[in-house]
Image (cartoon, rainbow, N blue to C red):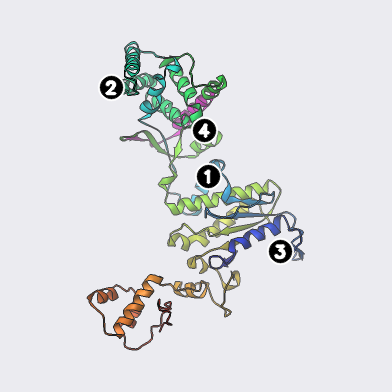
Amino acid sequence: MALLLGKNGAGKTRLLLNVAEVLTRGTEFGDQGHWAARTDDDDSFTSDAKRPPDGFGVVYFTPIPYTRSTDVHPRFVDASRIPAKTLQPYMFRRYDWIAGILDETHRPLKARICYRKSIVERAIVPFILDTDNECRLNDGSLERERVRVLETRRETQTQIVPPEFVRAVSNFLHSRLSKNGHEHRLIALATLERQIRRVGQRAAVISYFLKAFDLASVSEPGLLEDHSDLARASSDFDKIYESTFNVLAASEHIDTINDRTVEGIEFESNSAIVDIVIRSPNSAVEFSWSDLSSGLLSLIQQFTRLDYAVARLRKSAIKSVLLLIDEADAFLHLDWQRQYVENLNTFLSELKRHHNLDSLQVLIATHSPVISGDFPSPMVQRLDSERSEPFKTFGNSLDSLVFDAFETSSIGSFAAKKIRILRERFLRGELDDEDRALIKEIGDPGLQRAVLKGQAKMAFNIPPSPSGKASD
C-alpha cells in the first residue's frame, strides 16, 4: 500500500490514470515510464511502457463525480462508473460481509413494501375517465357515477374530478383487493406503483391491473400503440407480484407504515430475502439504504465496487491486481477517515483471500492529513512540492501533518486574518469590547496569549495579512 499526496492541480488523478494505461494497455512509444516486477522466487524483470505485464489488472475508483473519462479495455475497470442497477444485487449479497468488516453487523438492512396513497387519484382515476380506453367498472352504482362524471366534464368542458368520486373509487378498489387479505391488497398496489414509473407502459399496466383483479373491463386501451405492450406489462406485473409475495413470506418483525402519504410495511432484511431479490431483482421491495449513516453507506458502496471490479478481472484469469483509489475519503467524517486505512487493510486482506489473488497492491491519493498519518514516510510520494527536507507522517500530530505533508496552515485563512488584525489593533492600543470578546473565542490558549503579549513573536503559521506584510 502506498500514498500519493499533492495540491489541487498537482496531477494526482492524471498520474493514476497514466499508471493504469501503462500497466494494462501500454503506450505507443513507451515514453510514459517503466515498470518493474518481482516473482515469488525473487526474480525481477522490467520493461518500458510499450509492453504491459502479463496477467495484471488495474481497478480505479473515486467517489468524486467530476473526473476524467477513461477508455474501457479488458484489464482495466473503472469501479466508479459501474451502473448502480448492475451493482445493486451485488450490494445485497455482500452487505453483511462488508458491514462485518466495518463492525456494523448490528445494523441489518431495512426493506419495505409500500405505495403512495395518491395512486388512485393520479393514475387509476385518469385512466378510467379516459374515453379512449373503453373502461367499465365492475360495480353498477360506481359505473353509473363514472358515466355521470364523464357527462359533466363534457358539458362543462373541464377536467375537474369530484373528490367524492375519487374516494368512492379508492374504497371500491381497497374493498375488492382486500378480499384475499391485507397483504394481497398491499402487494397489488405496490406492484402497480412500481410498474407505472415506466410512463410508456402506464396504460398497459393499469389496464392489466384492473382486469386481473376483477375491478373493471377494458376493451382496448386507446393509449396502446402495440398489442405486445399489454403482453409485456402483464408478464412483468405477474413476476413482480410473485417475487414481492415471496419476500413478504420470508420476512419477520414487520412494522406498519401508514402516514399521510404512504401505506405499507417495513421489515429487516435476511439471507432468504436477499436470495429472492438477487434471483428476481424486479420486485416491489425497496431497501432503505438511507437508514445507514452517510459514512457507512459511502464505504459499503466503495468496497462493493472494488469487490465487484476485482471479480470482473478474475473472470479474465487475472491474479495480480493494482487498486488506484482517488480521494476515497472525500465524503467521510474525520472519525471515519481515522478508521479508513485500518478498515481498508482488513477489507483488502479478505478481498485477496476471497478472490485467490497472487498479489494485491494499492495506491491511494488523498487530501486527508488524518489518512496520511497512517503511512510511514517511505510509503508516501508527494507531488508538486517545493520542500526538499524529509518529513515524517506516521503517527504524527495533525498540525504537523497539515504543515509538513500538505504545506499549509491548520488555521482557517479567515480566522488567521482576523487574528492578525486583532494583533495589530492590540499593538496600536485600539482594542474595543468586540475585539476582546473575539479574542476570548480563540480556542488555542497559546495563540490567545500571543495576541495580547507585548512584542513577542506569534509562533504560529499564519499567512501574511492582506496588505502583503510578512507575519511575526
Between the residue at mark 2 and the residue at mark 4, the CA separation in whole angstroms equals 35 Å
Give residue 222's position: percent from left, percent from top: 48, 18
Name the residue that disc number 4 marks.
Answer: 282
**Magenta stretch encompasses residue 193:** no
**Residue at 50% of width from left, 46% of height from top?**
95
Q: Quadrant of the C terminus?
A: bottom left
Q: Main secondary structure of the magenta part?
A: helix
Q: Amino acid at mark 1?
A: Met
- Of labels 4 and 1, earlier in sequence is 1
Between the residue at mark 2 and the residue at mark 1, the CA separation in whole angstroms equals 45 Å
Q: Is residue 359 visible?
A: no
Between the residue at mark 3 and the residue at mark 2, the CA separation in whole angstroms equals 74 Å
Picture quadrant of residue 235: top right
- How crowded pointer 1 is (Cα within 10 Å; few <14, some 14-19, many 20+) is rated as many
363 lies above or below 238? below
Segment tinted magenta in the rendering: 235-258
- Of labels 3 and 2, earlier in sequence is 3
Q: Say left or right for 98 vs 106.
A: right
Name the residue that disc number 1 marks.
Answer: 91
Picture quadrant of residue 38: bottom right
460 lies above or below 190? below
383 lies above or below 356? below
Q: Say left or right for 384 vs 332.
A: right
Give residue 328's position: percent from left, percent from top: 52, 58
Name the residue that disc number 2 marks.
Answer: 164
Q: Amino acid at mark 3?
A: Gln
Give the secondary structure at mark 1: helix
- Name the mark nearer the viewer: 1 or 3: 3
- Name the mark nearer the viewer: 3 or 4: 3
Between the residue at mark 3 and the residue at mark 4, the CA separation in whole angstroms equals 46 Å
Q: Say left or right for 311 vs 417.
A: right
